[in-house]
Amino acid sequence: MSFLGLEGLHAFVTGAAGGIGSQAVREFLDQGCKVTAHDLRPITNLPTSPNLFIVIGDISSEDSTKSCIQQARQHHGPINILVANAGITDESNSYPIWKIPLELWEKTYNTNIRGTFLTIKHFLLSAEEVQISTGKELENLAIVVTGSETGKFGQAGHTEYASGKAGLQYGLVRGVKNEIVRLNSKARINAVAPGWVDTPLIEGRLDEPDELWTEAQATVPLRKIAKPEDVARAMVFLASHRAAGHISGECLGVDGGMEGRVVWKKEEVMSGTQSTITSRMMEKAQSIIQPSLSPPPTRKIKILLSIDFDAVSGFLGTGATANNNMADYSSGYFAGQVGVPRLLKLFKKHKISSNVTWFIPGHSMETFPTQTKMILESGAEIGCHGYAHEGGAQMTESQEKEVIAKCVELATSLTGSKPRGWRAPLYQIREHTVKVLEEHGFLYDTSLTHHDSEPYFLPSTPPIKPINFSPEVSATSWMKPLPVPSSPTGKTLVELPCNWYMEDMTPMQFLPAAPNSHGYVPTSSILSMWKSRFNFLYHEHDAAELKVGKGNFIFPLVLHPDTSGMAHVIGMIDEMIEWLKGWGGEVEFSRYEDVAREWREGQKL
């Protein structure tokens, strides 16, 4: 047995995609442990090992946390050690307590406090289940929580982070130590409190000598910041009953012996070499501090949640094939009879029913009148989506004109007003379609993707013709750029972009006749992809760009009752909506029509 005696034990590490978390995983693997690495983001920075299992989940979601703990236990067996490491902080801004945006406070606490609580809760519930089934206590039951030296000394401009960490390392840890021994007589919980750690999270932050001195060297006897392995090895030590078996409820500082934090930076208070702060210097410091602490403009992020109620029509138009049979059409009936009510119930639960848009083919309106009426009564916007889900290439221009007229007639009869939005079946829109939509007074289309997160005017250009590469044709005939679009007019449609990667059906619905159909992609992959897209768009602009009004965006999602109504998918939709709501007041679920109208009114034609 090694000094730590951890061989063969199962450790569950959250925040494993980060610098400290990934190093903790490596240290436990080096000790002969089986390790489950957990993060919200894809984990790509760990070595391949038969003792390593990776799960993706959101610690602020109880269902997700419970599921990940269960997956880990099924893969590696009972979990002996929990390293509750996951947490977030926003180093891009500094706010005094009286200017902290509520959304930032709630977002930080939602992950750091709620997430740590849920992780500990379900780790201990799992331990309880194992002990009841085996009739004996789990070996080496230990919890290590990642706190922060800001929880000891505070941090000006980051009370939302520092207060939460203080609550974890001194409140939660000391309370839990008195409870877990009732579950397991030798169980322990401790915290580590790192100072600055050299991880990608602070890359470049301490490159300036003055900044390094202020944040690390001035108050740290060891005159340096920690490496991830310094923190990870302290975690492994505290997790070991053999090495730290009589330590519980403690917070171990991994901060180089830090004595405190610098409150006033040199440039804020110093004039000459005076060592005391006079009233005049205080006034000068205030004048310097206040401008940098003003909050950035509040973002406006519009979540455009839409549902294509294709049902049986999906197999009659773009999905038509001689091989379609009753089994295929049956999934269309499922969409109407099961999928629609399930989605309506979910939207009602989240109180967003009237802030979503349903695109309904005329065939579905007439085939499923009861479900269509339920959609209408939910308060949702209703847009058009062809009649029998026919693609532009399947019809003559005359037929297409008849289809659009019929769709307008049905939608107007249903809602009492003309429809304002169009989504082309399978996104197969052509120049003639646009012309007819403008004639019928449509406000917007949502079939194209010239941009992925901003509205724009649908460009008016002639059709793009394929190049004729026949040997007898001169290359000069095709070496020409595309024409410049004509200027928008009062009839020009607003385009609210659609994107194949923002819909559910293509990856998660099995369609026997569709060559690009998968149907067996796990929901976790799609959830992770959607969240990754949102996270990039949220962080695409830097602080300077935010101050000049950049940073707002729209986030379209396209659902189908046949897909998202399925029992194994709808829970993922529930989780995604909850995750989006977790961004607070910056996020608003909106109808397509409202966003298109607001954007158009802001343009100068």
Image (spheres, rainbow, N blue to C red):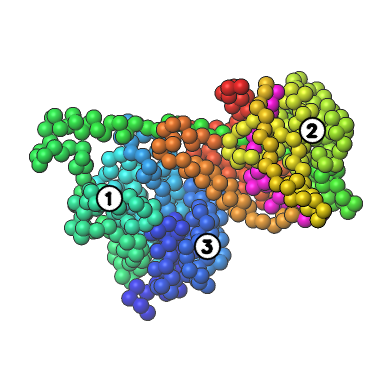
Query: Which x, y percent locates residue 551?
Result: 49, 36
Indicate whether residue 495 is drawn in magenta: yes
- Answer with left or right where residue 34 lies relative to residue 71: left
Q: Which residue is mark 2?
A: 432
Secondary-structure class at tag 3: strand
Query: Which x, y percent locates residue 314?
Result: 81, 43
Numbered label attached to residue 287: none
- Answer with left or right where residue 430 lies relative to residue 501: right
Magenta highlight range? 491-515
Q: Residues within 10 Å of mark 3 (few under 14, many from 20)?
A: many
The C terminus lies in quadrant: top right
Indicate whether residue 423 is drawn in magenta: no
Q: Which residue is mark 1?
A: 208
Query: Which x, y percent locates residue 229?
Result: 34, 64
- Label 3 – label 1 distance at C-alpha: 37 Å
Foreground of the two, 6 or 207 = 207
Where 259 sits versus 463, above or below? below
Q: Nearer the viewer, mark 3 or mark 1?
A: 1
- For image coordinates 39% across by 52% down, the residue present is 201
- The single residue placed furthest to the right in the displayed view is 322
Q: Residues within 10 Å of mark 2 (few under 14, many from 20)?
A: some
Q: Which residue is mark 3?
A: 54
Q: Residues within 10 Å of mark 1 (few under 14, many from 20)?
A: few
- For image coordinates 32% across by 41% down, the residue present is 158
Secondary-structure class at tag 2: helix
Earlier in the chain: of badge 3 and badge 1, it is 3
- Answer with left or right where residue 593 lies relative to residue 534: right
Q: Quadrant of residue 603?
A: top right
- Label 2 – label 3 distance at C-alpha: 50 Å
- For image coordinates 66% across by 34% down, the residue present is 484
Residue 339 visible in the displayed image:
no
Q: Nearer the viewer, mark 2 or mark 3?
A: 2
